[in-house]
Amino acid sequence: MTSSLSLQARLSAIWDQTGSLVCVGLDPSLDRLPAGVTRDLAGALDFSKAIVDATAPYVAAFKPQAAHFGSLGGEDELAELISWIHERHPDRLVILDAKRGDIGSTAERYAVEVFERYDADAVTINPFLGDESIEPYLEHTNRGVIALCRTSNPGSDWLQLQPENDPIYLQIARRACHWNRAGNVGLVVGATWPQEMEQVRQTVGDMPILVPGAGAQGGRIDAVVAAGADSRGAGLLISASRSILFASSGEDFGEAAGQEAARMKDEINFERRKRNR
Amino acid sequence: MTSSLSLQARLSAIWDQTGSLVCVGLDPSLDRLPAGVTRDLAGALDFSKAIVDATAPYVAAFKPQAAHFGSLGGEDELAELISWIHERHPDRLVILDAKRGDIGSTAERYAVEVFERYDADAVTINPFLGDESIEPYLEHTNRGVIALCRTSNPGSDWLQLQPENDPIYLQIARRACHWNRAGNVGLVVGATWPQEMEQVRQTVGDMPILVPGAGAQGGRIDAVVAAGADSRGAGLLISASRSILFASSGEDFGEAAGQEAARMKDEINFERRKRNR
């Protein structure tokens, strides 16, 4: 389902329509699949589809994770899942979480893989190789390119926080403004770093920010919204995976996932209202 | 073909046995496939196998590039190519050039994908997410983990060369020494930066270094060998793709590729001998 809108315009419409900033990460670890689901590739696909349908009323986006399918030889299942989301929930964004990073003709091939083969609306990319690793994606102006900026894990500090007077993550944020000629660029900033989120938001205006790490990794929703919301009180996709996917290990997993997504939506919106007061 | 040796021990044996530091990058771009090869996935696989057989006598390693197969839906073909190399040329290293970078359970899934599904001997990884993105691979002690350190493209300078007093690429080199508990770590340093190669070599001792950028991107073999060879005059895998793969656009492409690989081997060994004098 390709839209002619830019990432930013499309997300604005989705945020308005759904009233939600929630993104559900689809990482179907076989060893955590709930009762009644077979622990194989077919089970992972069925589980993911059920999660999508159960949570769609409460969320803005879905983020399938490439490794969880690739490690099982599940390329066809990944494509089927994305197609399922497009068909049944056309007004939700699909972000393929692939974090690819390469240059030149190789980056062009990765862009073809994510945007043409998988028909993802957006993809996460890794900026370590610099500008040549971003440019080939940007030509797909009706798709989104979401670059890692400040990741949620502490083991990335030594790289992303240097040099002290102008850390890499802020430099990436400034570069993202230049990459963003067509409104098709976003950034990843972990929920675990609200201070840095605030600096990034000040740097990038209303650019969309994808925020992992709000659930199991300990990031706080109130701090994320206070630091990261854009001028309209939106601008964020706050992503949760395990807390929603595995909300119940029983056969009521879909209902439990829907409830957890709804709860997260409400918590975020409670904080958004506080901010607008 | 799994060996019980570490990456470093296995490469030492391969370098001794083949007398070659050449690595052939397998990036079968459909639009450059030579005469007599169909421009589709089956053609790309046949072409890659023919290149492998024609160049194997002159090289130490093969480096299939994941995007060139993934963008065509060619996962099975990639697995078949790797299996072909293992069966016909068991004493050559297979490096899957995937440059993955993620953390936690996702990194574990990527490690399963490259080492179990594809049975690659080694994989390239992207260190932007820090230590958590490396550790899950290191547990596979009989496989190799080759981290990007200083990439060959100029657009990576702003990130990899900071801060001035202790640039990221040197910090990665130092960290690689700590990651290297089992002798299974290597680094990527572009042929375009001989001065930085020299610093990295001084930092990492005899750790293997994979060197792209020696052909089309303008890196010089003499400078690479002078700056990067280890204490035994080896320690390098100097990688070329297009200059070997597309040495001829005619039906003699295999013969031409073999000649180019042999020429490159000889040029490298000429420089190695100069260095040992």
Image: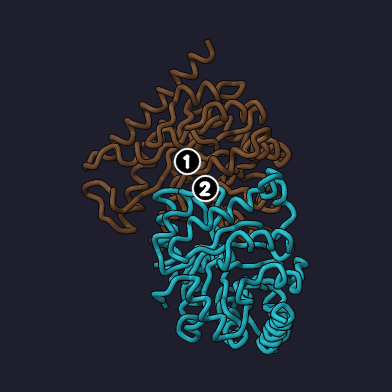
Chain colours: A brown, B cyan
Kindly check if marks 1 and 2 are in contact, taking CB atoms under 8 A apart as contact: yes
The secondary structure type at the circle numbered 1 is: loop
Where in the figure is residue B94, as x and y percent of width and height?
A: 52, 74
Instruction: Relative to A164, say whether B92 is above or below.
Output: below
Where in the figure is residue A187, as x and y percent of width and height?
A: 59, 38
Q: Is residue A74 left or right of residue B33?
A: left
Amino acid marked by disc 1: Asn
Marks 1 and 2, Cα distance to the nearest angstrom? 8 Å
Asked whether the viewer can see residue A159, the reply is yes
Where in the figure is residue A269, as x and y percent of width and height?
A: 45, 21
Q: Nearer the viewer, residue A194 or B19?
A: B19
Q: Which residue is drawn at 50% across and 35% down?
A: A190
Q: Answer with the quarter of the image where residue B154 lies.
A: bottom right
Judge the density around disc 1: few (<14), some (14-19), many (≥20) Cα neighbours within 10 Å.
many
Badge 1 and badge 2 both on one subunit: no
Q: Which residue is drawn at 46% across and 73% down?
A: B79
Screen quadrant of the N terminus of chain B: bottom left
Mark 1 — residue?
A: A153
Q: Answer with the quarter of the image where residue A113 lies.
A: bottom right
Amino acid marked by disc 2: Gly
Mark 2 — residue?
A: B130
Judge the density around disc 2: few (<14), some (14-19), many (≥20) Cα neighbours within 10 Å.
many
Q: In which chain is the residue bearing label 2?
A: B
Screen quadrant of the C terminus of chain B: bottom right
Q: Residue at x 71, y 85 (%)?
A: B266
Q: In which chain is the residue bearing label 1?
A: A
Q: Answer with the quarter of the image where residue A103 lies.
A: bottom right
